[in-house]
Image (cartoon, rainbow, N blue to C red):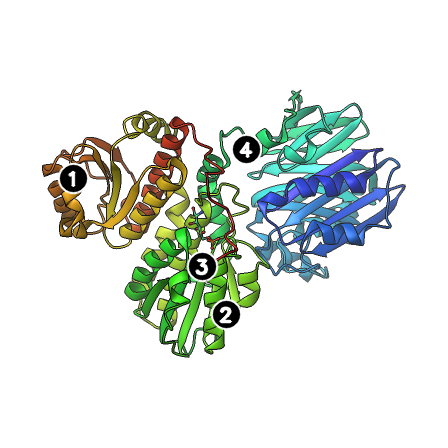
């Protein structure tokens, strides 16, 4: 999501900032900006879209004397991706960049507006720079003004601030959002992760929550609760790819661990006063629709399928789902009152894009759910909801799947609100469960270790059946797809109740059943289906919060107060199982054979 870079020293500052921001591009963003003070002159550039646009705007600018510089990539949360909302934000004579969320910004904004401050952006960040200038006016002491400013902020932040009031100093603070300091001789760097400064700084200090201070030529003063703290520098790794993986063995592993955090990003600004709200959908967009049709491929097809249960159950609206490559050639009958939804991680999948064009031609309203802004599918759709998973590098999709599922769940609740099919109480239950989701996605050491040990028992056999019912059937399909993609073992997802209609003939001890047994949904039904397989000697790995005696192996889950919480927790288990099996088999987890991240051919 958002990224920060800062620099204090004599080198060409524009290049350090632009290079650093480019290193953060993989996190995803929709605007970028820089501010530089050199020789008391303040320069600022912002651009919507890619860093290349910012490069173009700054091509005639250079800054190679001593100076201070801050830069930012922004992924829109409060307010649209516009230049006005892009960081750095300006007061009268100071600039700020910020990652995180200032939870009390509305209260602070009102206070400042009453005092005559004019706000230019819709962001929470802008209050920081105005607060700083207000306190500077009172004290004429820039560090004191900065300290007073951060003492007023509630929420998460990593902040860099520069001001014409003190042209040789960068002020910084960290609480809940990552930030580090880099050092090389007299040069001082700042960044929200270490990739932007690798190859530039030689030593690093990772700031702790509650730390703040200021940097001046060759020195940094660091404080925590008013006490000065000693900086213990450590050597900075030199390998960028290793750093981008943050110590994980593969991007896919890192992305599985990131799911808890990105899920909060998916929800930010979209759950307000016990209601779901997507600013991307204007008030009348959903008014005339009487049915939903969803088209997608692969993993995105699985979220589509799972969401069809939610749309029908929560919003009481008919929802059909089709694999895009099938839809294209079946001469489908389309009704103008049907909302046509496409789901795609990349936004470039050829079959999905063509299906969308067909629906548009037939006069249907279209909505895409996508992780990549400005992708072909997003541009082609009437409107789009971005999943905000950040760039996903592993070919086998994990966090994109999770965030798609969250958006669809939220959308089904929003439709339920609109169609009055959900009571206030039901709505509160859904929203409370949504807010609990990040917790259900946390990967514990115990779980990961257990799956690592278990994986060695599942490297052979003549196949895997992932089984589940209801929304756990699409999750079974997804679990099987993950395993197939990266382990090259044969795996199928199946509705649990359907096994006895054929596949059970395959059951023996060399057939592995991965049973998704949610406590909160049809538990007794799935239990009987698993018992039938156990009776035929299939080797069973059961995943449930309820201990199950007939299982050969058992993973106990924790969050069973709502089916979606069980869904997300079991999703993590199946992802880690696939990952560990693939690693044991020595496969390239991130780039499995024969597969591409973006499938732009039919
Ligand atoms: C997911 O692990 C796969 N790599 C694949 O099934 C993917 O979901 C499919 O190709 C659709 O891609 P999209 O979401 O980018 O449209």
Q: Which residue is mark 3?
A: 343
Task: Examine the image and state in which quarter residue 516 appears.
Answer: top left
Residue 12 in the image, given as x and y percentages of width and height: 83, 38
Mark 2 or mark 1, which is nearer the start of the sequence? 2
> Where 359 sits versus 302, above or below?
below
Other-residue count near label 3 (Cα within 10 Å), few / some / many at <14 / 14–19 / ≥20 = many
Q: Nearer the viewer, mark 3 or mark 2?
A: 2
Q: Nearer the viewer, mark 1 or mark 3?
A: 1
Looking at the image, residue 307 sits to the left or right of residue 265; the answer is: left
Residue 140 in the image, given as x and y percentages of width and height: 81, 43
Residue 247 in view: yes
Tell whether circle 3 marks a residue whose Cβ is less than 8 angstroms from ligand 1.
yes
Other-residue count near label 4 (Cα within 10 Å), few / some / many at <14 / 14–19 / ≥20 = some
Q: Which residue is mark 4?
A: 245
Q: Which residue is mark 2?
A: 357
Mark 4 or mark 1, which is nearer the start of the sequence? 4
Q: Residue at x 27, y 27 (%)?
A: 457
Secondary structure of residue under mark 1: loop
Q: CA distance from mark 1 to mark 4?
A: 40 Å
Looking at the image, residue 547 sits to the left or right of residue 387; the answer is: left
Mark 2 or mark 4, which is nearer the start of the sequence? 4
Q: Which residue is mark 1?
A: 507
Secondary structure of residue under mark 2: helix
Mark 3 or mark 4, which is nearer the start of the sequence? 4
């Amino acid at each position: 999501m958002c990224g920060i870079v800062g620099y204090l020293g004599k080198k060409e500052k524009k290049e350090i900032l632009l290079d650093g921001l480019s290193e953060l591009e993989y996190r995803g963003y929709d605007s970028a900006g820089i501010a530089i003070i050199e020789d008391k002159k303040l320069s600022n550039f912002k651009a919507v879209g890619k860093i290349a646009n910012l490069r173009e705007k700054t091509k005639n600018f250079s800054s190679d004397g001593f100076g201070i510089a801050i830069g930012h990539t922004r992924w829109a949360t409060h307010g649209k991706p516009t230049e006005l909302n892009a960081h750095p934000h300006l007061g009268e004579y100071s600039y700020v960049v910020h990652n995180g969320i200032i939870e009390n910004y509305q209260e602070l904004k009102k206070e400042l507006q009453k005092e005559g401050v004019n706000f230019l952006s819709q962001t929470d960040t802008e209050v920081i720079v105005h607060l700083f200038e207000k306190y500077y006016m009172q004290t004429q002491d820039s560090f004191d003004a900065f300290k007073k400013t951060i003492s007023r902020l509630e929420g998460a932040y990593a902040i860099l601030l520069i001001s014409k009031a003190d042209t040789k100093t960068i002020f910084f603070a960290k609480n809940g959002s990552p930030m580090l300091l880099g050092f090389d001789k007299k040069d001082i760097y700042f960044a929200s992760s270490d990739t932007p400064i690798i190859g530039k700084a030689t030593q690093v200090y990772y700031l702790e929550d509650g730390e703040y201070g200021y940097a001046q030529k060759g020195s940094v003063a660091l404080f925590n609760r008013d006490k000065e703290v000693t900086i213990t520098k450590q050597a900075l790794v030199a390998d960028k790819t290793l750093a981008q993986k943050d110590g994980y063995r593969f991007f896919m592993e890192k992305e599985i661990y990131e799911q808890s955090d990105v899920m909060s990003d998916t929800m930010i600004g979209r759950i307000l006063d016990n209601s779901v709200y997507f600013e991307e959908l204007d008030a009348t967009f959903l008014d005339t629709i009487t049915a939903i049709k969803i088209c997608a491929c692969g993993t995105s097809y699985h979220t589509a399928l799972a969401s069809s249960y939610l749309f029908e159950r929560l919003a009481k609206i008919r929802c059909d789902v089709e694999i895009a490559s099938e839809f294209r050639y079946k001469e489908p009958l389309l009704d103008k009152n049907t909302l046509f939804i496409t789901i795609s991680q990349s936004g470039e999948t050829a079959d999905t894009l063509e299906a969308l064009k067909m629906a548009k031609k037939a006069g249907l309203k279209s909505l895409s759910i996508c992780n990549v802004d400005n992708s072909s599918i997003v541009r082609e759709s009437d409107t789009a909801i971005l999943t905000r998973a950040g760039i996903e590098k592993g070919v086998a999709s994990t966090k994109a799947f999770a965030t798609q599922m969250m958006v669809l769940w939220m959308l089904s609740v929003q439709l339920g609100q609109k169609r009055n099919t959900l009571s206030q109480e039901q709505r509160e239950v859904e929203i409370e469960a949504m807010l609990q989701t990040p917790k259900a996605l946390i990967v514990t050491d115990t779980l990961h270790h257990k799956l690592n040990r278990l994986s060695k028992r599942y490297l052979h056999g003549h196949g895997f059946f992932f089984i589940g019912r209801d929304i756990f059937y699409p999750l079974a399909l997804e679990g099987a797809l993950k395993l197939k993609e990266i382990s090259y073992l044969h795996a199928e997802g199946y509705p649990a109740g359907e096994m006895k209609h054929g596949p059970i003939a395959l059951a023996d001890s060399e057939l592995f059943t991965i049973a998704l047994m949610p406590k909160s949904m049809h538990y007794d039904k799935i239990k009987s289906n698993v018992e039938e397989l156990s009776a035929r000697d299939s080797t069973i790995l059961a995943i449930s919060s309820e201990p199950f005696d007939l299982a050969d192996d058992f993973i106990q889950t924790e969050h069973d107060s709502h089916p979606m919480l069980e869904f997300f927790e079991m999703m993590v288990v199946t992802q880690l199982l696939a990952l560990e099996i693939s690693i044991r088999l020595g496969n390239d987890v991130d780039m499995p054979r024969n597969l591409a991240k973006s499938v732009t051919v039919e």
